[in-house]
Image (cartoon, grey):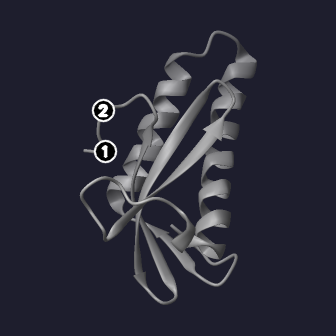
Amino acid sequence: MSSAQGGFQVSYTRQAQDDLLRLYDFLLARARHSEDLARAQEVIDQLREHVERRLSQTPHLYRHPLGNPHLRELVVAAPGAGYVALYDITDSRKVTVIAVRHQLEDDYL
């Protein structure tokens, strides 16, 4: 998966793709109504759109996780939740999303 909405191309590692599927499955498991099923896909789509828009335009803006000057984290607010995308600015035109997690999860891996 990749996107190039701004100056940087955004791509996802296999781990990050698996993380998005895991988060989707988590939302489906919590669904109580049929509207919640559609909402699960909307949340994941909005998460991806936000990550790709922000990172394609301003990847240098976001914070470094503690202890690692090469990686950065983008915090994404969502209704009732939040997500964190771990990424690397691979070169002058490319950003690679390494992992995505819910804000309440302990770690990326």
Q: Residues within 10 Å of mark 1 (few under 14, many from 20)?
A: some
**Residue 21: quadrant of the picture:** top left
How far apart in space, not on screen, are marks 2 and 1 (Cα)?
A: 7 Å
Quarter of the image for the C terminus: give it: top left
Element carrying mark 1: loop
Residue 3 at x, y percent in the picture: 60, 73
Q: Residue 67: horizontal and vertical position, in percent?
A: 24, 57
Residue beneath disc 2? 106
In the picture shown, does residue 104 fall above or below 66? above
Q: Which residue: 47% across, 30% down?
A: 25
> In the figure, is residue 96 to the left or right of 81?
left
> Callout 2: helix, strand or loop?
loop
For image coordinates 29% across by 39% down, the residue present is 107
Q: Hey, which quadrant is residue 19 in on the image?
A: top left
Q: Where is residue 34 in the image (x, y as percent from the top left)?
A: 72, 17
In the displayed structure, does residue 9 sit left or right of residue 67? Answer: right
Q: Badge 2: few (under 14), some or many (20 or more) residues near its Cα, within 10 Å? A: few
Q: Which residue is labeled 1 in the image?
A: 108
* Residue type beneath disc 2: Asp
Count the numbered circles shown. 2
Instruction: Choose between 86 and 37: the one closer to the eye.
Output: 86
Q: Is residue 44 above or below residue 64?
A: above
Q: In the visual, does 11 lie left or right of 64?
A: right
Amino acid under disc 1? Tyr
Q: From what the image shows, is residue 71 above or below residue 40?
A: below
Kindly identify the residue that appears in the image at 75 percent across and 20 percent down: 35
Picture layout, residue 16 above or below residue 44: below
Give the farthest residue toward the bottom: 92
**As rendered, which of 89 and 5 lies closer to the eye?**
89
| Image coords of residue 69 (percent x, y) | 30, 68
Residue at x 26% of width, y 62% of height: 68
